[in-house]
Amino acid sequence: MDIEVLEGIFDANEKIARENEALFRERGVMAMNLMASPGAGKTSLIAATLQLLKEKLEVGVIEGDIASSVDAEKLKAYDIPVVQINTGGACHLDAIMIQQALAHMDLAAIDLLIIENVGNLVCPAEFKLGEALRAMILSVAEGHDKPLKYPLMFSDSDVLVVNKTDLIGLGDFDMAELREVVTRMNPDIVIFEVSCRTGEGLGAWADWLEQRVRDFKES
Amino acid sequence: MDIEVLEGIFDANEKIARENEALFRERGVMAMNLMASPGAGKTSLIAATLQLLKEKLEVGVIEGDIASSVDAEKLKAYDIPVVQINTGGACHLDAIMIQQALAHMDLAAIDLLIIENVGNLVCPAEFKLGEALRAMILSVAEGHDKPLKYPLMFSDSDVLVVNKTDLIGLGDFDMAELREVVTRMNPDIVIFEVSCRTGEGLGAWADWLEQRVRDFKES
């Protein structure tokens, strides 16, 4: 019974996701769905990315949280369009929430739309939003064994940003093992190693993302 | 429409949870539902707790994961009854899964049943399993702002274990602020500060848990 119900929800979501995707394509907006566990560094990565790309691209952000506008407020300093979605309990964003948020944004003025999903390594992976790029963050503090336990997120993302590399050596985190397991599950995934705290690796990430936006707009 | 469907699921779950609760009561088993984000240290806390309580109490464990038996295997050395549930995609345990797992356990031989939920700071909080104690872990690496963003888990838990205290000072984690916010949301919550890596604070946690089991069995 559960499965039947979920299939109904997924079908409805899938339809709206395709509408969002068509709208993004029409307006030349590359949308990135950014997913991760709570505290992995989603907002920190967005802030660092804005810092590096704000002169090169027009960026907009949709912040998804169950409650509060803590994250949206952290981005106020960047003077960019930010819409906060409060899901009111729901553990993931869905395409309908995004469709509603888009009514509050001037898409013609945006090249890159970053959608920060609810902190959750499970459910967000199941709901397409219409994004062109599915990005995930894994924090070093979470451990290298996570791909085996949360396979859908790792196998279904286009890019994995491993954050908090400044913590390597304090625990038993094994980057080589993480890379091997993730690449076996998802041979096409692109992996970056960064520390939003020290800035390490962020330049390579931002350069790659900028190129993805340019490729999208030309395609 | 979503809400209607979810209410149906919750009602069915609530009914089975009450059946589990009655069974635990009848057999003198104190069940603890242990919830946290991925990588916060659920399995590490269970291993440390087993080490400290194995001579004092009979402990059983139900491991909940979307996939793999990585966690159950970590507990093999303790020679206790462990049942692994693979949810096959579901982002939380529910009461029906627990009821099925209990058919594989000799409850008469167990004082404390630790149920490790799927790594997720959102959905597990919404599904009662029949537990007498709702426990959550927050890792220092996740940050002290999580209660505002994931309020249900914090307001609905009986005990909060703050793990990875050995990382305090490396980031901007503020324990005083965390305690203030959590206590405002949930004045009755008991908070422990531990490091499963260094062992700090684990004795106080295990002593408290042992007492809770003894109180339950006498009540």
Image: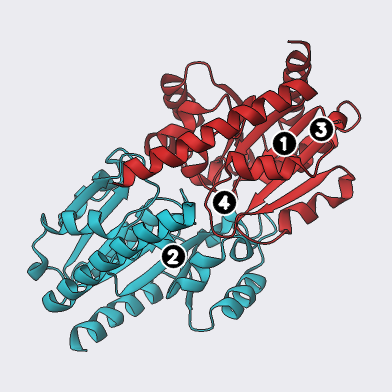
Chain colours: A red, B cyan
Amino acid tagged 3: Leu
Given this view, does label 2 or label 1 mark the residue nearer the observer? 1
Q: Secondary structure at mark 2?
A: strand
- Answer yes or no: do the residues labelled 4 and 2 have beta carbons within 8 Å? no
Give the image location of residue A208, x and y in percent.
72, 20
Amino acid tagged 4: Pro
Tell me if residue A153 comes above or below residue A159 in the rendering.
below
Q: Secondary structure at mark 4?
A: loop
Q: CA distance from mark 1 to mark 4?
A: 17 Å
- Residue under label 2: B136
Amino acid tagged 2: Met
Position of B175 compared to B34: left or right? Answer: right
Give the image location of residue B114, x and y in percent.
27, 63
Q: Which mark is residue A107?
A: 3
Q: Are marks 4 and 3 on the same chain?
A: yes
Q: Residues within 10 Å of mark 3 (few under 14, many from 20)?
A: many
Q: Which mark is residue A38?
A: 4
Residue drawn where x is 38% and y is 70% of the image: B134
Q: CA distance from mark 2 to mark 3?
A: 41 Å
Q: Which mark is residue A114?
A: 1
